[in-house]
Image: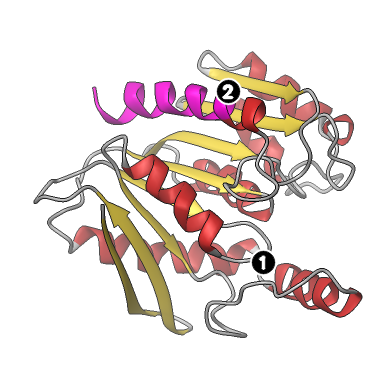
Amino acid sequence: MHTQTETITSPSGPMGVYVVRPEGEGPFPVIVSFHHGPGLEQGSKDTMAMLAEWGYYVISHDRYHRDVEWYVMGGRSDEDMQQMFGLIMGTDEGKVSEDLGAVLDYVAADSAASDGPMGCIGYCIGARSVLVTIGERGEQFRAGVALHPSFCTTDGDDSPHLVVPSYTGSLYVGFGSADTMQPASDNGPLIDFTNALDKGEADIHDGADHGFGVLGPSYHQAAGDASYERAKVMFARELQS
C-alpha cells in the first residue's frame, strides 16, 4: 500500500490529510473516511488500509485541526474523556462540510484519484458526518457506511437521520447490541429509514460494543466482518460499475 500524510489549505487554515491507496498510478475510486471521536490513531489507519486493499483511494482529514493537530486520545481518564467530548462538540457539521470541500479539492488534483462516484464511511461521530454528507452531496457520494453511529437521531429539525429517505445511493448502518453509549434503541427512526431504502440495510450486531468497526482492542470480529462484507458489496456496486 502507498500512504502519504499531507498538510493542505482549508478555509480555516492548515489541515492534515492522510491517504492510503494501492501502489500504481490508478486512478482508484475514492472513499472518504470520517474518523471516530478518539482521532485517527493506528487502528483507524489500519482500517483505512483494509479498505484500500479492495482497490480504493481512501482519505481521511484531521477533524479537530482548528484546536489541535492530529489529536489522538491518550487514555480514558475523566480528563481525557472531557477533552475528547469537548473536541467533538466543538466541531460541528458545518465545519466538517467546510473541511470536506478542501479534501475534495485536494483529491481532484491527484491523478491517482478517480473523478467518478465516491463513497464515504464513518465511525462514531464520523458516522454522523456520513449522513450529513449524503444529504448534502448525495449525487457525488453514492455509497455511505455508518458504523456505531453517534448523535445521528435527535429531536431537532436538523437531525442527520432525516436525510435518509431521500437518498438514492447505497447505505449501510451498523450498531452493536452492547453499545450503551449510543444504543440502537435510541436510533429506531434511522434504522427504519435505512431499511426502507431500495439499497439500504441496517444491522444490530449481537455482542458488539461501541467502536466495533475500528481495528484494534474494540474490534468485534463477527460484527466487523459482517459490516465490511456489506460495505464491500455496496462500494463495488456504486463505485466500480
**Residue 18 position in % (x across, y down):** 38, 65
Dot 1 crowding, Cα within 10 Å, few <14, some 14–19, many 20+: few
**Residue 9 position in % (x across, y down):** 35, 81
Q: Would residue 231 be counted in the magenta stretch?
A: yes
Looking at the image, is 154 positioned above or below residue 37? above
Q: Label 1: which residue?
A: 92
Q: Is residue 67 left or right of residue 158?
A: left
Q: Secondary structure at mark 1?
A: loop
First along the sequence among labels 1 and 2: 1
* Mark 1 vs mark 2: in front: 2
Q: CA distance from mark 1 to mark 2?
A: 30 Å
Dot 2 crowding, Cα within 10 Å, few <14, some 14–19, many 20+: some
Looking at the image, is 32 positioned above or below residue 67? above
The residue shown at (22%, 59%) is 108
**Label of residue 172 in the image:** none
Query: Could you tell me the amino acid type at mark 1?
Result: Asp
**Residue 140 position in % (x across, y down):** 36, 41
Which residues are the magenta region? 225-241
Query: Could you tell me the amino acid type at mark 2?
Result: Ala
**So how many labels did they put on this image?**
2
Q: Main secondary structure of the magenta part?
A: helix
**Residue 214 vs residue 139, the one in the foreground:** 214
Q: Is residue 150 left or right of residue 113?
A: right
Q: Residue furthest front?
A: 217
Q: Label 2: which residue?
A: 226
Q: Is residue 201 left or right of residue 48?
A: right
The residue shown at (33%, 44%) is 52
Residue 148: image quadrant is: top right
